[in-house]
Amino acid sequence: MTALQRNHLYQFRGQQLRYSHQSNSLVNAPFIFNDSKGRRKELSQKQAQMEVFELQEFCEN
């Protein structure tokens, strides 16, 4: 897995999430994401490594 980039769009279990920041708490859920409704989702390092995939954002010309 490459390093997560702030404000980039990722997919987790079929849901699109935008990466927000890394938490100071490295024990429980160090990766913080927000969904399209602004709800916070916290993922563990294992979840992020195995189940988070970066989505490419496209725009029409």
Image (cartoon, rainbow, N blue to C red):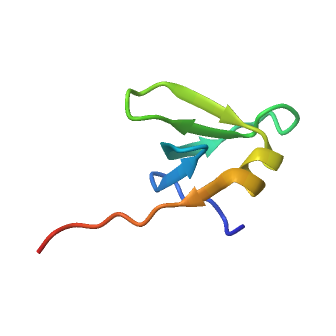
Q: Position of residue 16 (x, y in %)?
A: 47, 45
Q: Position of residue 7 (x, y in %)?
A: 45, 51
| Residue 60 position by quadrant | bottom left
Left or right: 43 as drawn, with respect to 39: right
| Residue 3 position by quadrant | bottom right
- 41 or 16: nearer the eye? 16
> Which residue is painted at 35% across and 63% down in the image?
57
Q: How many numbered callouts?
A: 0
Q: Position of residue 40 (x, y in %)?
A: 54, 27
- 45 or 15: nearer the eye? 15
Residue at the right extreme, as displayed:
27
> Which residue is painted at 41% across and 66% down in the image?
56
Q: Position of residue 18 (x, y in %)?
A: 47, 45
Residue at the left extreme, as displayed:
61
Classify the position of the N terminus by image quarter.
Answer: bottom right
Classify the position of the C terminus by image quarter.
Answer: bottom left
> Which residue is painted at 76% across and 56% down in the image?
49
> Which residue is painted at 46% across and 56% down in the image?
8
Vertical placement of residue 28 versus 3, above or below: above
Left or right: 1 as drawn, with respect to 26: left
Residue at the front extreme, as displayed:
14
Left or right: 56 as drawn, with respect to 2: left
